[in-house]
Amino acid sequence: MRHVLCVALGTLTGCGSLTYYGSVADDGERTNGIDPITDPLETTEETTDAPPSAVEIRIDDLNPTYGSNASGQWVVLNGSFDESTTVSIGGLAANVLQHEPDELVVELPTTTSTGYVDVVASSPEGTDTLTDAFQYWADATGEAGTIGTVDFFQQVGDYWTDPPTNYSSGWFAFSTGTNWTLWQEYTTSQGSCVFDHTYDADPQAITTGATQVRFSNQAGGFTLDEGVEKSFGADWYTNDDLNAVLQTGAVYDLDPVAGPDFPSFDLPTAIEMAAPFQVTSPNLHGDNLPTTDASISLSWSGSGGDYVLIWILRQYLFEGQFIDDGVVSCAVPDTGSFTVPAALWNTWFAGDVLHIQVGRAHIDDNVLPHNGADSRIAGVYWVWGGAVTD
């Protein structure tokens, strides 16, 4: 004889079966078992658990909210999802890499499109859409996405008409992607020099809508303000007086930019300024102007820069006025010495004045998270002195 037994205990209900091998007397008394007629726990139907409640499909937020259209980067969606939830970004299926009830990790689909797109989570239980929730940027891998330089000039020597003074400034812009790099503003190839060099690359600057950008560290920082529009247009940020705030030998982070259509991210170690050093040949730091022939042998102390920039302006005196007579500029390895070839000067006369600037450059090597471009902001410490031709 088989009985189904259901027992309620608190909020827990359980059902099971019981097999009885005894007998029942004719008068209805139990002989060795359970009376199938009078037992109050007897039931003739089994109960089953209630079906699980439906999951609400919901996207609360995602991170990041921007990325390169060719990166395949990971994007995290927070919200409420079931095991069958799929995701599309900009109408393209995003591969779900990791699934949790409150989190999905997906691979950003590649596309040729740019701009804001919708993010959709779907399952048989429902669909949720975040409108214009993700911003695609054109991929700029291998190109420059930030350009600019922060310069500190240490004027040395006791031979100037006015006492030497230090000077510092900076300029900066975001770019959609350009081949710009600082050394190209000085020469055609690294390890070389050029006479009266020109460089006309379009930096493809971006209009962010931000009124300033800020670079900071634990000791403070400085801002570059919007307001200077170069021939290329768009947003450029500059400051021509950083003397009171710029620290030599310091590292600065780029703070998140407060632009309405630009992603908010910080950039650690965006600018590295070199420590002070000396130019030992010619001795620019002395009391008297050093002399040099057309083959200018330069030596400097220290090392560790990505490269060293050299800028030499020649002037001659005419009717009481100094007249510019050409510039030689170079980008060379930071090995401690370099000789400027005499052949670069088209003429050479004794008694002309040279303004000699030697700068140790550190170039940022971050990769920008929104378009995969390189950050190429330069921090340059310059030693500025003079000499006389012989």
Image (cartoon, rainbow, N blue to C red):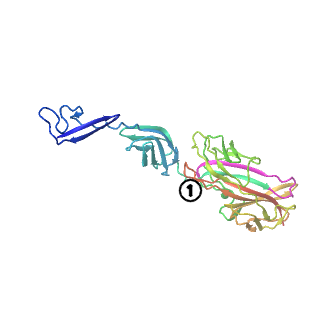
Instruction: List x then y, in percent, for residue 274.
Output: 71, 57
Q: Is residue 48 magenta?
A: no
Identified at 66% across, 48% down, the residue is 172
Instruction: Classify 10 Å Cα crowding around label 1: few (below 14), some (14-19), many (20 and above).
Output: some
Instruction: List x then y, in percent, for residue 207.
Output: 61, 43
Q: Which residue is mark 1?
A: 142
Q: Is residue 157 magenta?
A: yes
Q: Quadrant of the C terminus?
A: bottom right
- Identified by mark 1, the residue type is Gly
Quarter-of-image position of residue 294 = bottom right
Q: Nearer the viewer, residue 199 or 363?
A: 363
Mark 1: secondary structure: loop
Query: In the image, is residue 38 above or below residue 346?
Result: above
Quarter-of-image position of residue 364 = bottom right
Left of 357 or right of it: where is 216? Answer: left
Q: Is residue 85 visible?
A: yes
| Span of residues in magenta | 155-177
Query: In the image, is residue 154 above or below residue 122?
Result: below
Q: Nearer the viewer, residue 215 or 57?
A: 57
Instruction: List x then y, in percent, for residue 264.
Output: 58, 43
